[in-house]
Structure formats: structure tokens, C-alpha cells
Amino acid sequence: MPKPVLYHVPPSFYSQVVRLALAEKGIDYESRYVIPGPASFESYAPWYMRLNPGGTVPTLIHNGRVIPDSRDILHYLDTRFPMTTLRGNCSTHIEVDRFVGRLYAVSFRELSYGSPRLRKLGAFLNKKRVQNLQKRRAASPDLSETYSAKISDIEAFSRKAQDHRHVEQVRLAVERQLDQLNTGLACSTHLVGEDYTMADLVWTVGIARLIMLGSKPLDNRTALKDWYERMRLRPSFTQAGIMERFRPSAILRVLWSKLTSRNSAPTQPCTSTNTRNDNSPAL
Ligand SMILES: N[C@@H](CCC(=O)N[C@@H](CS)C(=O)NCC(=O)O)C(=O)O
């Protein structure tokens, strides 16, 4: 089987989710960096928007199929590389998906850009994002609708991140989720039953991000703290580059790779895929 190609960057939250799945499943992949922010806003380049109309990382390409969403990628990897399962047995699938859904219901971008530390910078960056998208829309009329949709997405997100009351509600909802995780872990070694699943995987990245944002998700939550310590000790945590604090070296690595390579664009045409609703035959 050919190696999957992953477009990502080290600090990106959803890229970390996918890298952790790749590491847990022992899947070898080709790594390509695409910068989703200043100064290049490379993920808004037309070639990339054709792969991933949301202009976001990560995107996975495998056997000519394009999967432009981390949750779809998780399911794709678990189905197409079944050597170790990340959803347990069929009796746990629904429960695992429920925990994964709870993580994906949290808007980490609103929490990040709405945090007191980042609010001003976030608003500035989003302004730059919209300007960049407008320029690109003017230069690529065939992608006009795709760029317009992305502009609306960024404008709506930016408004929410500037709304203190909204961000506080998101934060409180996360606190409630953490309390529930802590309660469940008091009588179980993993979030769903006694085996490691996708639920543990996505929430590991979630907790790491909350730590990075300066909140204290593990304080007064003993069971959650013990569980997280165990997750951190798994080799995949380091292999996948899960970050609990911002690491300038990770950015330098990306910039260096950009300076020393010419292009990240794929060399073959691909078709877009939504694997969660995809009943097409195996690759
Ligand atoms: N639903 C997408 C969200 C991906 C996402 O928001 N990625 C961020 C980085 S963690 C990004 O690329 N943001 C740039 C932008 O939205 O312009 C997924 O799960 O893959």
C-alpha cells in the first residue's frame, strides 16, 4: 500500500490529532508542511483550496483520495489500516464516537483566539486572513465561492472570539466536560472501558491544548490527572509532537523546510472524500 501523505504543521491542534492516530497505529506517512497562517497563508493558495476547500490543515491523501478533515481522517485510518483498532470492539463504537463528538463540539479556535492573552492578536490575524482571502478570490474567479465561504467562516469565528460572554460560555462548557471525564475515570482506566481508544486519543490532544492556553484542566481532578500522565507516557505522545506549550523551534523547523524545498503541491490529481459517509469499496 502506498504511504499516506499528510499536509499539516506541528502546532496545529487538528494536525496533532491525526499525527497521534498515525503514531498509535504505527502508520508510516509522508509529511508535508502547509502554513495556515501569516505571512504566507499557504493553506489559502488555490492548489490547496482545491484539496481542502476549508483552507485548513490537516489534509490526508492516500491512494488518490483526499480527506480534508481530521475527524474523517481518524475514521479513514482506523478503517483502512485495521492492524490496531481505535474504536474498541463493536459494543464500544457508539460510546467512543460520543466521546470523540464531545471533543469536536468544543471550539478550540474560539477558546484560543478569545483568550485574554490572544484576543487582540487573534483579531489582527483574522483581519489579515480575510484580506489575504479577498486578494486570492480576486485572482482566482473559479474559486470565488470557495473563498467567499471561507471569508464568511473567518468573519463569524472572529466575531465569536471577540464576544467575551460567548467565550466564557465555551470555557464553562469545557469545564463541565472535564468534570464528567474525571468522574468516569474514577472507575475505569480509559475513557471508554479498559482499552485505549480514539476517545483517549482526541482528549489527550484536548487537554494538552488547554494546558497550552494557560487553563488548569487537571487541577482538582485526580482521576483525570492520573489518566493524562499515562497518556503522556505512551511513546505516541512524543512521536506525534503533542505540544503543551508553544515551541518556537517547531515553527523554525517549518520555515527551514520551506526554504529548502520548492513546492508542497501534489503531483497527481485527487478526488475529495468524506469517509464518515463513504460506503465506496476498499482502496
Ligand atoms: N474541521 C477541521 C478543522 C481544521 C482546522 O481548523 N485547522 C486549523 C489549524 S488547527 C486551520 O488550519 N486554521 C486555518 C484557518 O481556518 O484558516 C478538521 O478537523 O480538520
Image (tube, rainbow, N blue to C red):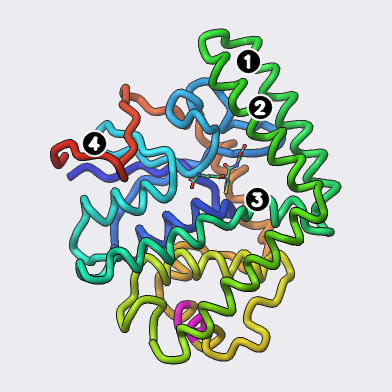
Q: Position of residue 82 (x, y in %)?
A: 19, 59
Cβ of disc 2 within 8 Å of ligand 1? no
In the picture of the structure, the residue carrying the numbered disc 3 is 109
Residue in the foreground of this view, choosing between 184 and 27: 184
Question: Is residue 230 one of those drawn in magenta?
Answer: yes
- Kindly indicate the quadrant of the structure image that contains residue 177: bottom right
In the picture of the structure, the residue carrying the numbered disc 1 is 137
Q: Is residue 225 left or right of residue 91?
A: right
From the image, state whether disc 2 or disc 1 is nearer to you: 2
Q: Is residue 261 left or right of residue 97?
A: right
Amino acid type of disc 2?
A: Ile
Labels 4 and 2: the sequence-earlier one: 4
Q: Position of residue 208 (x, y in %)?
A: 59, 69
- The count of marks equals 4
From the image, state whether disc 4 or disc 2 is nearer to you: 2
Q: CA distance from mark 2 to mark 3?
A: 16 Å
In the picture of the structure, the residue carrying the numbered disc 4 is 63
Mark 2, secondary structure of its residue:
helix
In the picture of the structure, the residue carrying the numbered disc 2 is 151
Q: Position of residue 10 (x, y in %)?
A: 55, 53
Amino acid type of disc 1?
A: Arg
Task: Tell me the quadrant of the picture where the C terminus can be found.
Answer: top left
Q: CA distance from mark 4 to mark 2?
A: 31 Å
From the image, state whether disc 3 or disc 4 is nearer to you: 3
Q: Tell me if label 2 and label 1 are in contact, CB under 8 Å.
A: yes
Labels 1 and 3: the sequence-earlier one: 3
Range covered by the magenta-colored residues: 227-231
Tell me which image quadrant ligand 1 sits in.
top right
Labels 4 and 1: the sequence-earlier one: 4
Residue in the foreground of this view, choosing between 90 and 238: 90
